[in-house]
Amino acid sequence: MELSLLFWLLLPIAASSGWLAAKRSLSRQSEHNARHLSSNYLQGLNYLLNEQPDKAIDIFIKLIDVDSETVETHLALGVLFRRRGEVNRAIRIHQNLVVRSSLNPQQRALALLELAQDYQRAGLLDRAEHLFLELIENGHYRNFSCHQLLDIYQQEHDWSKAVDVALQLMDYSGENMNPVIAQYYCEQADQLRRQQQVEQAHKKIHQALKIDPACVRASLLEGQLALDNCQPLQAIHAFQRVEQQDALFLSEAIEPLQHCYREDGRMDEFARYLQRILQAYGGITPMLVLARLIHEQTDASAALQFVVRQLRERPSLRGLDHFIDISLPGAEGDAKENLLLLKDITSQLLKNRPIYKCRECGFTGKTLYWQCPSCKLWNTVKPIQGIEGE
Ligand SMILES: [Zn+2]
């Protein structure tokens, strides 16, 4: 059993048996109550220590009637059960607490807060939501309750409620929620795009960009939406905005940009764009796309020369893999065998290599998540840089 809980459980016994209240003059009746409380407490404690929690809870709940000073003990006991995953027991204790009329407003608020967390843990999200809203309305634990509500609305994909609460939280705490709110708008935009509600999707994208002009996801969504609707010029405009927002995400914009420029028949302009990007930021994706373009517009040897030059400047696994791809058709005999062996190695390395990494918790994967699946933070997962990445 946790020491802190043991402290809370023993405190009432200590108080009633005179350790802490030696100078308190008790009437005969209260002396009787104290002895009664003390023996009941010891019995409850005994049940708890002997792993008979339900019998212990029965006794502790009866004791609330005897003495409201034991509220802290009940709160601590409830928290302990929740931490041990025994949520139903925690709920029973906290539910019994909140209905007591003897609780002062602070005690009641704390009991409600614990009960709300029990419900949340038990997956009873609507009940948890209701209690957190009540706490906020009464001015108790507003920041914490807002964060818990955000968790609930995110789980339920209720993005519009999430926006409202995040705005409220910004008011209460001054915490900058703008980048997160922009992601909520993007979630809505993405959903609307899939339902082909183009105009509504555009509205949400603009709301995202208004509240967070650096929202890369909004630009990528705007580009995709324009591409869906055969508007390559608008798409180019949106995808190119990523450069100013966060150049680390350029790799996400380059492939769709290639598609746009091709649709629009402006591949020379695209090649110049890639050269500029490559010079300014490096990056393997623009290099590989440019190499393929050189191959397409000139020949394999020009593409090979370009890749070799780039590999000397910026060694990378994907660059090496592409170098082997271009070299293989012209190779014969042992040279070809060696290249095939190398290709096998680079393919294996690339197959197991994550592409994205969370800057906060280190989670890695091959999918770009705007909310990290591990630490649940937004905007922390980015393309991996360096020899094995971009
Ligand atoms: Zn993370």
Image: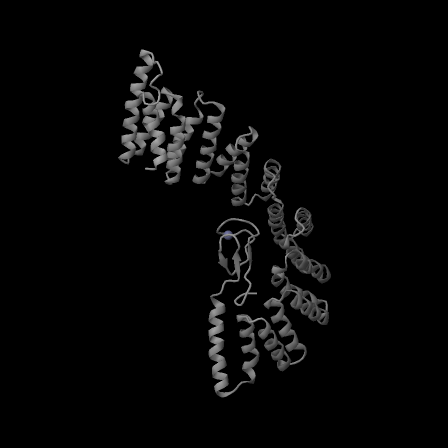
Residue 138 in the image: x percent, y percent?
Answer: 55, 28
Q: Is residue 273 left or right of residue 43?
A: right
Residue 275 in the image: x percent, y percent?
Answer: 68, 70
Quadrant showing the C terminus? bottom right
Q: Is residue 302 visible?
A: yes
Q: Is residue 262 visible?
A: no
Task: Give the answer, above or below, for where 101 lies relative to 239.
Answer: above
Task: Specify the farthest residue to the top.
Answer: 28
Task: Specify the farthest residue to the front.
Answer: 23
Which of 135/222 is in front? Answer: 135
Q: Is residue 176 left or right of residue 366?
A: right
**Residue 95 location, quadrant:** top left
Quadrant showing the N terminus? top left
Residue drawn at x 31%, y 20% as measured from the top left: 18
Q: Is residue 20 left or right of residue 204?
A: left
Q: How is the image coloured?
A: one colour
Residue 385 in the image: x percent, y percent?
Answer: 55, 63
Residue 54 in the image: x percent, y percent?
Answer: 32, 32
- The number of numbered discs placed on residues in the rendered structure image is 0
Residue drawn at x 53%, y 39% as measured from the top left: 149
Task: Give the answer, above or below, for where 260 lies relative to 28.
Answer: below
**Residue 227 location, quadrant:** bottom right
Task: Give the answer, above or below, for where 334 lies relative to 197.
Answer: below
**Residue 381 location, quadrant:** bottom right
